[in-house]
Image (cartoon, helix red, strand yellow):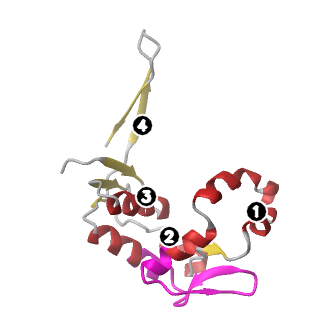
Amino acid sequence: MDADILVVGGGPSGLMASIAAAERGARVILLDKGHKPGRKLAISGGGRCNVTNAKPLDELIRHIPGGGRFLYSALSVFSNRDIIAFFENLGIRLKEEDDGRMFPVTDSAKTVVRALVGRARELSVDLRTNHPVAPRSSRPADGRRSDQCRT
């Protein structure tokens, strides 16, 4: 399959990026070095998967070690509210705990993995497992940098 976009890594960010691109009409290949996309996600948060925090953005950022101000630009584009909506649109019901942490009501990270992988497959994302990627860079005489990867 030819692709418009190649995503390296089948963790939550890679799966979400693949879904976002495919929903916009791109042909996507996702490469993951492991045997299953979302493998580490399935054990995150003690197996429960804390997907985000429901606190207001300013409060959330204040509680991040080091002040978290570096997150303002990223979270102003895709906020914790957007994350909640994203997962709910995948059919994952979430619950908020007293400290604001958001978990799937199933208390199972596998719910999140199944939904992400299922949506990627539904959108015909080409999920290729056992495909490690080795980066290589070179700087020819003209000074331009060339990045390549070997799969």
**Rendering coords of residue 30 (x, y %):** 33, 55
- Where does label 1 land, which residue? 61
- Identify the residue at image location x=49%, y=76%: 87
- Determine whether the residue tagged by mark 2 lies in a helix, strand or loop: helix
* C-alpha gap between disc 1 and disc 2: 23 Å
Identify whether 48 is placed above or below 66: below
Identify the residue under disc 2.
Answer: 41
Give the mark, 4 or 1, whose residue is nearer the N terminus: 1
Position above or below: 144 against 121: above
Q: Amino acid under label 2?
A: Leu
Give the residue pinned by disc 3: 17
In the image, taking residue 46 as reference, residue 63 lies left or right, namely right
- Residue contact between numbered discs 3 and 1, judged by CB atoms under 8 Å: no
* Span colored in magenta: 86-114
Estimate the spatial distance between the alpha carbons at disc 2 and disc 4, rounded to whole Å.
24 Å
Read off the residue under disc 4: 135
